Every structure is written in C-alpha cells, then in structure tokens.
Amino acid sequence: MRREILAFGSIVIDNVLVVKKFAAVNETVQAEKYRYTYGGAGANVAVAAARLGVKSSLFAVAGSDFKRMNYEKHLKREGVDISGLLPAPFLMPRSFIISKEGSDDQVLYYYENKRGTSKILFENWKKAIKLANNHEVCHFSTGHFEFYYHILKKSSIKSVVSFDPGQETFSYPYRVKRLIPKCHMLFMNNHEAKRIKEILKIRSIKELIKEEKGPNLICISLGAQGSVVLFKCKSFRVPAVKPEKVVDPTGAGDSHRAGFISALLKGYTIETAAKIASTVASFTIEAEGAQKSLPRWEQVVKRYENFFKEPFPQPQKSWEEIKEELLS
C-alpha cells in the first residue's frame, strides 16, 4: 500500500536565541531566551503531516546522537515512518537561529561532516528512489540539492514532486535553478521569489508556470500578509491566519507546506488547501520550536471556521484527480 508524503531533508537540533534587536558588526546583544528543540526542514514537514493524519515518512541521514537526543523516540511517537533514515558515525547538524519578533530570522548552520553526509546519501540513491515510488508526494526541502538532482534526473520517480529551496536559494542558486524544472509544486517566500527571478532572469514568477517543464503550482509566502498561489493560469491570495499569540516563527514555512500537501492528499481544492496551510502555520508560531505546537486535524478545522467565518468544507475531489492536474 502506497504511503502519502515522503519528506527529503535534514534532521537538525535547532538552537534558538530570541533577541529584541539583531547585532550590528562588533556589537554584543543580550539574548532574551535560549532553547534547543528538534528541527530540520525534512523532519518538520514529516511530523507536521503526521499530526494532520497523513502517512508520512522521512528520508535523511541520522547522526550518531540521533538516539541519545531522543529524536528517534520523538519521531516514532509522532507516527513518522523512519525506515528511510540512514545512520551516520558523526553528529547531527546544528542550526543557530537568531529570532526577532516581527522580523525574519538570522540562521547559522553547522555540519560536523557535510561531505560524509553527502557520501551516505549517494550510496543509498536506489533506496531513495524505491521509497519515493511508494509515496504519492515527494517533498524536497533544504538539504543536499546535488543528491536531489541525481535521483530526480533518473526520471524514474512517478510521484508528485514538491520543492521548497529555502535559504539555499541564496547559498546555492545554481543548484536551485537545476531543480525547479524537475518539480510540480514550488514553495518559497517573497525574498526567495525575488532571488529566483534574478537567477532565472525573468520579470515575473508567473513565467515559470508558462514553461513546458516546471511547476504547475507555485506558492509564495508573504509572512503576516499571507500567501499568493499560482496554479496554471489562475492566481489568488490567501490571508495569514491570526495565531492566539506570537512566540517563535521557526518552522512556520515547513508546517505550511505540510498543511498544503496534506489537504491536497485529502481531496481539497488548491484554494482550500492554501487556506488550510495558512491555518496550520498559525499554530507553529505559538510555541518555541518548529515542532512544539503543531496541530491535529480537528484543531485546524475549528480555527479555520473561526477565522474564515465559513463552515469547514468537505473534500471536493479525489486525490487521483488532483494528482492528474498537478502532473499535466
């Protein structure tokens, strides 16, 4: 039986410092809070989808401290299939996130052995393709883009391909450029959209939709201003759902992607899926850490109805119909 979402990405320990202002060069700023939490874009998406009742799996390299930090126990408890995790003799990566309320984050990333991680992934590329073909959607997030390109260029993956390049749009633009034609759904924020236009030398992101090869669906997150969704010849805007409190925006983008894809798998239209995604993301920023306050489906239904002032809709299509639209 095919599973639903296979998330490619990373398993990371997030170290978050909350500040009132970002430090200038040679300036010391006192952090208001510090904590470490479970993170990594791939793991964030897999856990968020599992919370929403979707059968999710994760393909990533698990560091030598994966069990010791209780990350393995956490994923199992959340219902994420971890058969795609690859053991490594070195530590999990660490991210150091400087977070300021009402602003974008500053992120520093540390790999103990990035080359070793890449080697392990490439040694297991056949396993990746086998797992991918047992899932309806493969979501590729921040991670090893050369590996992603390697398995996607094999043209043997029959799943819907979703891609969120994240901050690597700025770090490795040429790798992002190579992957965009391989995806059916493309997610980004407004800063990344601006950079992608520069990379591809296009005047509007809409031009990507017109390409013979490339995404049929593009979603651009605008933070507190919501998101813009482009689907073939249509476009619409969805407002940001207001959270009960604003604590930490870390991981909101990942939960938004998980909410969007999960809604499509359940049979909701593109526009309704975008509203559901906005609702899911609103929960993430209510607690410290990317995975601390991810909602269950019933919580999403209640908040959706309160915010949009309408009954929560029933699924309008089958997944097979939606899949055909995304692939055609």
Image: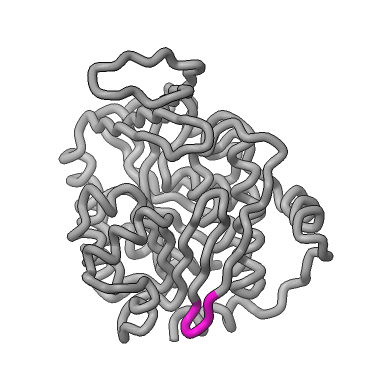
The residue at the point 36 percent across, 64 percent down is 130
- The percent coordinates of residue 191 (x first, y second) are 37, 53
Rendered position, 293 above or below 8: above
**Residue 84: percent from left, percent from top:** 40, 50
Magenta: main secondary structure: strand
Q: Is residue 303 above or below residue 227?
A: above
Quarter the N terminus occupies: bottom right
Figure quadrant of the C terminus = bottom left
Q: Residue at x 38, y 16 (%)?
A: 29
Place residue 161 in its image quadrant: bottom left
Which contiguous range is marked in magenta? 231-235
Is the residue 170 above or below the residue 231 in the image?
above
Of residues 63 and 207, the one nearer the viewer is: 207
The percent coordinates of residue 193 (x first, y second) are 36, 61
Whether residue 114 is visible to the viewer of this picture, yes or no, is yes
Is residue 46 in view? Answer: no
Query: In this orientation, which residue lies closer to the viewer: 41 or 212?
Result: 212
Task: Judge by depth and name the residue closer to the eye, 134 or 197.
Answer: 197
Residue 85 x/y as whole percent: 38, 44
Q: How many marks?
A: 0
- Magenta stretch encompasses residue 156: no
Residue 232 is covered by the magenta coloring: yes
Give above or below for 32 relative to 200.
above
Left or right of 19, for residue 49: right
Q: Residue at x 76, y 54 (%)?
A: 307
Q: Is residue 118 left or right of residue 249?
A: left
Color theme of the render: one colour
Residue 176 is drawn in which quadrant? Answer: bottom left
